[in-house]
Image (cartoon, grey):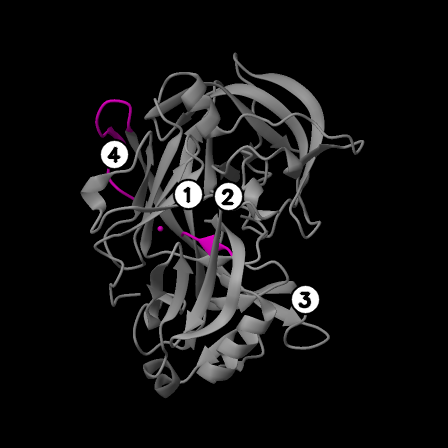
Amino acid sequence: MFPSKSLFGILLVSTIANASPFHSGITKVPVTRIQAPRRAKALYNNQFGKRHDETIIAGYNDEFYTIRISTSSTSIYKLIVDIGNPYTWVGNNPDNPYVPGSASRATGPRVKIYYDDDTITFTGMTHSDIITLEDALVINPQSIGVSDRSEVLDIPGDFDGLLGLGPTASTTQISEDGNPIPPIPTVLDSLHSQGTISDAVLGVYFMPHYDGDGGELSFGNYDDTVLASGVNYVPITNTRPASYYWGVDGSVRYRGNTILGPTSGIIDSGNTLIRIARDAFASYISDTGATLNPDGWYSLTRDQYNNLGTLTFVIGGQDYGLSPNAQIFPRASPDEDIFLVIDEQRTPNIAFWRYYVVLNASSSQVGFALTFYTYSTSN
């Protein structure tokens, strides 16, 4: 999501050849891994302060996982897959504006969408249109926002917006005059209500960098052909604000020691970083020995990396560990500098690339499973 919204959050971020039906009521749609230049982060106040004024770092990349959609005008848009956001919108790229088609109509009202840190994510008009995901899955109709801001989020300009796959969450949406508006149907809502899928279930499968060729979204059920274990389900948390999203309860350990006690968080897929609460982050950085470089990233020496322990998320009594190479930015070779993807912010969110996740709106549950890449040593 952009930005994060949780006490702790779990972020999934990772192309298969073609979208294809899995079996009755289930459709698999490919996602594409795209790299964009990584940005430096200027800090103020202290090393745990708010970050701002980002600039590009030559030679290093962030990763985003995207999907291609078309509308009734046959225009094509490249959207970042975002399961932490319920709202699908376009308009981030001024060179590829929304073009109304034969099925397009403005439904109004004009809306602003916030996250819990009061950052405006989207400002514009809601439309209804026919959208098609990767030439495979037609949604008729689907609500889609059309932004009128030249700079909506801190995402590269060649991305057109977000494909919102979060659950319906009216608390994230208000009209410009400050009055609440009714929930806007999400992609999963529409597919279910239109009878395209029998259950409002989404399976999310992303491969780590340099392993395989990407990942997929499975609408209607999970794809058991890519699982290396059964699925362990937990209920969506009752704790706000995580309860408005794909939120779960859990805790965090590093080297077996608890660094973040029982809390709640939101499953997300909007960026590369793994964000945890401030105190937990301070403990983690102290234990790893990482140092802050001038660009605002925490780096490790080779020896520090070789001594890096497992960062474990405990959810529903199950341990979901991130190996050392799952805690660093992808590298083209072992000789490149080592930077942590672990970060902190007031409402953290955490990257969870190595596990299959099932989002079940019908039963208000979230499921986790191993894949054949969970313990991969490549990054």
Q: Which residue is mark 3?
A: 50
Horizontally, is 27 left or right of 44 in the view? left
* Element class at badge 3: loop
Q: Left or right: where does residue 40 sit relative to residue 317?
A: right
Identity, as a three-letter code, of the amino acid under mark 3: Lys
Q: Is tag 2's residue or tag 1's residue first in the polypeptide sequence? A: 1
| Foreground label between 4 and 3 | 3
Measured Cα–Cα span from mark 3 to mark 1: 28 Å
The residue carrying mark 1 is 66
Marks 4 and 2, how far apart in space? Answer: 21 Å
| Circle nearer the N terminus (4, 3) | 4
Q: Is residue 131 visible?
A: no
Of 274 and 330, which appears nearest the observer?
A: 274
Q: Position of residue 263 (x, y in %)?
A: 54, 59
Q: Amino acid at mark 1?
A: Thr
Q: Which residue is mark 4?
A: 18
Residue 80 falls within the magenta-colored stretch: no
